[in-house]
Image (cartoon, rainbow, N blue to C red):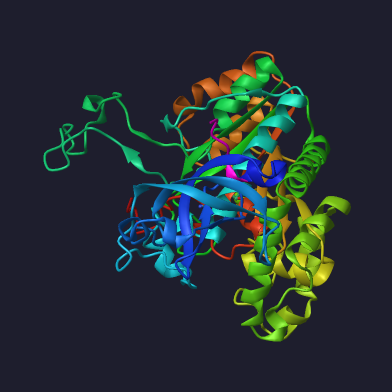
């Protein structure tokens, strides 16, 4: 008999036919009802066992977590809660689960506990739903770009350049840490290292994507990204996935239009294709919010929030306008911000971003034209000489979800910037070449994939939307 997934089975419902399913036991009630799940859907299939028909030694192995192959007839369910069930004729135990020690018992576990069991937490309904949505989002992202004339580009993971200039990189080396080769002045001699120079894990594929955009027109990267920032927050990972489209001949407005259309499109895809998982996650979030004080609960349910983003235009305002709003805001006047907004030029903290999005506009916001001083070296300088063509997209609950810009395409302006920042021009020789040979305006942005998954699934902590999270002091599994 052909293998079918529980999802297919529940959809087709071939009543009165013999079926075979494999899966893991969620619960086994009254020595009679097995709730079996194979990961293909949030729903279990109920398997009804006539215990007189089976040996005690087989029944004893059927505990939560055990892997079974079940053969039987699909019939209309006698009980409530499901439309169909399997009348079991044969049970094969792939592997039993030590019931006394299996960590994922059918009860509520804390997220902290489950993080310590990251290899098993995927067997909970919540994590399975989150990871199916994560997979669907990945597919939607590729589909969007492939349908819109973009080429998928694999940016290198090991690199010599610090694209963001923040110095938060993980070193890649094969030198002996106890006995590294030294130069005459006593510093480590990286010429003897594997690559003959200092190398790190990439913080962004942007610079390489720019090279490709200047030949293929429109490209995107979608890969792992590494940042050694010591931020123990619910929105930072040391290893995360980023989507970085880069487009020749796009100005900042084109870039913002693309980013907004892109986000709406992929959210629409999951609304249409992950309905059951999203409904489950919506209910989970509602239950979680019930434990919070009224003022901290969100006004919209998960699905309402997703539909709201899909159906409404994002607000677009300049950094300067945002500073005016923040300066005159209640929390600023009442000194409620941890970082009070005093003057133009201040870097925006997550509390400010969330005020703008959640309290002031109640809508996703695109902030653009930031002060040059607080942004990376590659962003295009505006006529005013002090702002750059940067844009950040701010989302409710998340804060910054996208960071992007129009790039500085003018060789002299870029060289001046690099010099002023004390970056060695030689290290960026190839990046400067792009401005020497057929330079043109171009733009791009980076979307933090886990922050998007967080928003889509309503999960409060970024560690719970990536299979095996890497954060300071934590790289188990
Ligand atoms: O704003 P960022 O640093 O922008 C760049 O890296 C540009 N090179 C992108 C580009 O223009 N091609 O990062 C982009 C996004 C952020 O908005 C955020 O969503 C996410 O990446 N991000 C992180 N996500 C999880 N953990 C971290 N430590 C993150 N740092 C950034
Ligand atoms: Mg940023």
Residue 34, image x, y percentages:
50, 60
The secondary structure making up most of the magenta span is loop
Q: Is residue 397 left or right of residue 272?
A: left
Return the residue nearer the eye: 39 or 353: 39
Residue under the image location 44 percent in, 67 percent down: 31
Residue 375 visible in this rendered orientation of the protein: no
Q: Is residue 236 above or below residue 336?
A: above
Q: Is residue 152 above or below residue 56?
A: above
In the rendered picture of this protein, how many numbered marks are placed on residues?
A: 0
Q: Is residue 114 above or below residue 359?
A: above
Q: Start and end of the magenta stretch?
A: 1-6
Extreme-front residue of the structure? 52
Q: Is residue 281 visible?
A: yes
Q: What is the quadrant of residue 438 in the picture?
A: top right
Residue drawn at x 73%, y 70% is 355
Q: Position of residue 249 (x, y in %)?
A: 78, 24
Furthest residue in direction left, as rendered: 179
Depth check, front residue: 391 or 120: 120
Query: Which of the 4 image quarters holds residue 245?
Result: top right
Horizontal and vertical percent position of residue 235: 55, 59
Q: Position of residue 241 (x, y in %)?
A: 53, 42
Q: Which image quadrant is residue 291 in? A: bottom right
As drawn, is 465 to the left or to the right of 192? right
**Residue in front for this viewpoint, 323 or 141:** 141
Front in this rendered view, residue 128 or 214: 128
- In percent of the image, x 66 and y 61: which residue is there? 280
* The magenta stretch spans residue 34: no
């Amino acid at each position: 008999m052909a293998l079918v997934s529980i999802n297919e089975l529940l959809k087709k419902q071939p009543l009165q036919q013999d079926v075979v399913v494999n899966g893991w036991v969620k619960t086994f009630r009254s020595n009679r009802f097995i709730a079996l799940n194979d990961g293909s859907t949030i729903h279990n299939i109920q398997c009804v066992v006539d215990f007189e028909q089976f040996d005690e030694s087989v029944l004893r192995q059927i505990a939560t977590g055990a892997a079974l192959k079940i053969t039987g007839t699909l019939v209309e369910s006698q009980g409530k809660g499901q439309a169909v069930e399997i009348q079991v004729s044969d049970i094969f135990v792939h592997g039993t689960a030590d019931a006394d020690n299996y960590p994922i018992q059918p009860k509520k576990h804390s997220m902290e506990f489950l993080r310590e069991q990251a290899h098993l937490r995927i067997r909970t309904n919540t994590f399975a739903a989150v990871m199916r949505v994560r997979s669907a989002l990945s597919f939607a992202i590729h589909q969007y770009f492939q349908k819109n004339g973009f080429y998928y580009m694999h940016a290198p993971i090991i690199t010599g350049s610090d694209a963001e200039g923040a110095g938060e990189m993980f070193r890649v080396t094969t030198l002996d840490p106890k006995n590294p080769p030294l130069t005459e002045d006593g510093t480590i001699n990286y010429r003897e290292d594997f690559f003959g120079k200092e190398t790190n894990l990439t913080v962004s594929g942007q610079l390489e994507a720019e090279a490709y955009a200047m030949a293929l027109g429109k490209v995107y990267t979608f890969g792992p990204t590494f940042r050694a920032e010591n931020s123990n927050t619910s929105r930072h990972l040391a290893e995360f996935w980023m989507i970085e489209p880069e487009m020749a001949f796009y100005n900042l407005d084109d870039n913002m239009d693309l980013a907004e259309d892109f986000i709406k499109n992929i959210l629409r895809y999951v609304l249409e294709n992950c309905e059951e998982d999203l409904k489950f996650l919506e209910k989970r979030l509602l239950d979680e919010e019930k434990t919070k004080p009224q003022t901290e609960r969100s006004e919209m349910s998960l699905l309402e929030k997703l539909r709201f983003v899909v159906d409404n235009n994002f607000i677009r305002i300049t950094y300067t306008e945002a500073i005016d709003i923040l300066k005159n805001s209640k929390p600023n006047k009442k000194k409620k911000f941890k970082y009070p907004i005093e003057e133009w030029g201040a870097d925006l903290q997550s509390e400010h971003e969330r005020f703008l999005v959640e309290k002031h506009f109640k809508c996703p916001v695109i902030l653009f034209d930031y002060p040059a001083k607080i942004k990376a070296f590659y962003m295009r300088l505006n006529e005013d000489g002090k702002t750059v063509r940067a844009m950040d997209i701010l989302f409710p609950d998340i804060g910054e979800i996208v960071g992007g810009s129009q790039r500085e395409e003018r060789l002299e302006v870029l060289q001046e910037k690099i010099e002023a920042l004390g970056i060695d021009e030689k290290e960026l020789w190839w990046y400067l070449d792009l401005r020497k040979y057929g330079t043109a305006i171009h733009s791009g942005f980076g979307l933090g994939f886990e922050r998007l998954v967080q928003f889509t699934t309503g999960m409060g902590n970024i560690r719970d939307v990536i299979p095996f999270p890497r954060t300071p002091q934590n790289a188990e599994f």
